[in-house]
Image (spheres, rainbow, N blue to C red):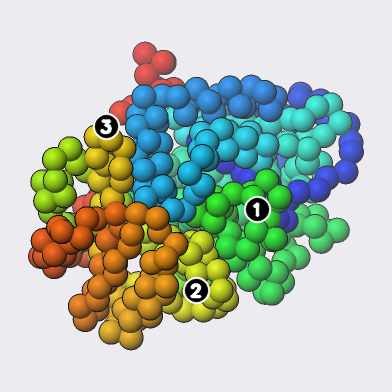
Amino acid sequence: MIVALLLAACTSASAGEASDAALVTDALALLPKVEDARHLARVRDVAVSVQTPEQLRVEIQEEALDEEAQEDLRRASYALHVFELVPPDLDLLKMMLDVLSEQIAAYYDPDRLRLILVSRGEDAGPAGANGAMADMIAAHEWVHALQDQHFDLWALRNRYFHSDDVDTAVLSLVEGDASFAMRPFGGESGDGLDAVTGQQMFAMGIAGEDPKLVDPNIGAMPAILRNTLVAPYSWGTRFARALVAEGGWPAIDRAFAHPPLSTEQILHPEIYLDPNATPPSIAAVDDVSTTLGPGWSQAESDAMGELGIRSMLATHSPALSWTARADVAAGWDGDAYQVYRREDGALAAVWASRWASDRDARALERAVAGWATRFKNGLEVTRQGHDVTVLIGVPTAVAEPVLRAVAHATWTPIVSLDAMAPPRPEPRAALSEAK
């Protein structure tokens, strides 16, 4: 599901008359203008329909209750809790359902090849929006439909990267492109992205890390979840703007053939654009379940990336300014973590990260050392040159052999999406149902 969220710039609307049929008609009339604005022509028609918020919530819940989605949620929950990034009693599924069902204004479904507008009733358009804002939302979704027809969003998104960092980077390309392309549809009143100044764009960029800059429901989310939700729109827009400034819309078209491979490349577009830049890397660390002791097994493996590290700093180093947190995270070269779970529910984590210089590594080491008293299960941080290792909940008696396993990790450059995670073979539901 590729969605348009109502974020900081998209939370107010005036009343107006808009039946479901009129919403569809208006959205279809907008498509030729979107084709011109995005410099992409449609290849085929796309079905457009309208949902109520209640129907949307049911659909999101059905997807969330899928067996594979439940397993993904369970694994993610282990990581969020061992790194103490969310409250212990957080109902992750309910929170995501509440936020998404309230914030999704429209979505394009590449699985079923359809565009859905979410109406809050007869007096408003998608998610309560009207006029220029409704046009921006519809334009955003039409861009997703055009992306799918030209760049195959299904193949791009239907893969398992084993890295939230890579996944967020790819989604930031998709959402940033659509968010940047919808700017001309903001109207002359200045309530759209076309009127966003450099300073306002910067504020949108840090919205995920500053709860005051987003909708209250999103602002109440833990930093790691807020950042992950907002970044593809805010930082993704900034990334798209940098690519268009460098090479026009063809530069974004080329990016779909060679997508960004880390949130570092989204946060710093100049790194993505530099053909000589060092690629991000990921560590393969031996499974240390046996070393931890009886009853332990690996429950999750993933990567934080620069954006994830910013979120961790926002949570555990609240005294640091936004600029200071960004400076600490900016030296990231790669990372990977493993989460282990014991039969009794105890959790432990091994997090290995590599940094551009000793200075960058020391900066993270100092920051993480200050977290030790915050972690109820204990935290140990060590540094060896450019590499920093963090152990959480690892018994002192086995810390040394676990550190040795990390020291022998294999670091592999991430050079392409296909090398990391080839597209999965499942056909789109629309094609399966047509047979």
Q: Amino acid at mark 2?
A: Arg
The residue depicted at 57 percent of the width and 46 percent of the height is 143
Q: Residues within 10 Å of mark 2 (few under 14, many from 20)?
A: many
Q: Residue 371: percent from the left, percent from the top?
A: 42, 67
Does the rendering let one see residue 256? no
Q: Amino acid at mark 1?
A: Gly
Q: Amino acid at mark 3?
A: Pro
The residue depicted at 14 percent of the width and 58 percent of the height is 398
Q: Residues within 10 Å of mark 1 (few under 14, many from 20)?
A: many
Q: Nearer the viewer, residue 409 or 48?
A: 409
Sequence-first tag of 2 and 3: 2
Q: How many marks?
A: 3
The residue depicted at 30 percent of the width and 42 percent of the height is 346
Judged left or right of residue 185, residue 48 is left
Q: Residue 299: percent from the left, percent from the top?
A: 26, 41
Sequence-first tag of 1 and 3: 1
Q: Nearer the viewer, residue 242 or 368?
A: 368
Q: Nearer the viewer, residue 2 or 74?
A: 74
Mark in the foreground, 2 or 3: 2
Q: Nearer the viewer, residue 128 or 101?
A: 101
